[in-house]
Amino acid sequence: MKKIIVTVDLGHFKAYNVTKEDMESPRITLIESYDSVEGHGKISEKFSDKTGRFGSVGSKNGTTTGSGEPHNTQLENSKRQLKLIAKDINSIITRGNCDGWYLAAGKKINNQIVENLDPSVRAKLEKNILSDLTKADKAALLDRFQ
């Protein structure tokens, strides 16, 4: 039996192989892990006003400038992140040659990740937990998914 566990949030991604041979207890090994720079930080750290340009309604020549507000930037960044996460999951499950896989992601992002998965990968999803388990240790992961 070969399974894959994927734990994810907008800043962290971890994928584990779970193997269980006859007469043995399950073994869990980390196969991929990364931290996303886009998932961390505040929007104000990514965008700032340039000196003398923020909030000026009209300039000397009579033209108007924008208010400097990044409209829907956070929403667009999270959508882009979720699509990349789904793409990474598709790649891991496809090349992993597993019997099935498990997903753990928070309530806010779980459904969007599943929607962006390939149908063949979604069909192999056996258990989906609405919880962020990216910081859980291996033993706790096995307890949650077994």
Image: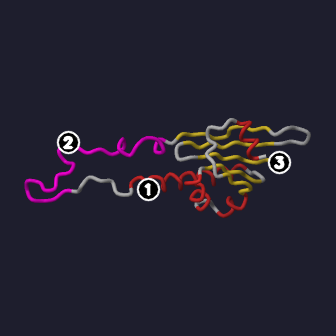
Residue in the image at 88% along x and 38% along y: 24
Residue in the image at 69% along x and 54% along y: 128
Residue bounds of the magenta highlight: 37-65
Nearer the observer: mark 3 or 2; the answer is 2
Task: Report the Cα–Cα distance between label 3 and label 2.
Answer: 60 Å
Q: Amino acid at mark 1?
A: Leu
Q: Residues within 10 Å of mark 2 (few under 14, many from 20)?
A: few
Q: Is residue 33 left or right of residue 145?
A: left
In this rendered view, identify the residue nearer to me: 116 or 97: 116
Q: Amino acid at mark 2?
A: Thr
Res 17 quadrant in image: top right
Q: Does label 2 or label 1 sit earlier along the sequence? A: 2
Q: Residues within 10 Å of mark 1 (few under 14, many from 20)?
A: few
The secondary structure that most of the magenta stretch takes on is loop
The x and y percentages for residue 122 are 68, 60
Residue in the image at 78% along x and 53% along y: 99
**Which disc is residue 75 wearing?**
1
Mark 2 = which residue?
Answer: 51
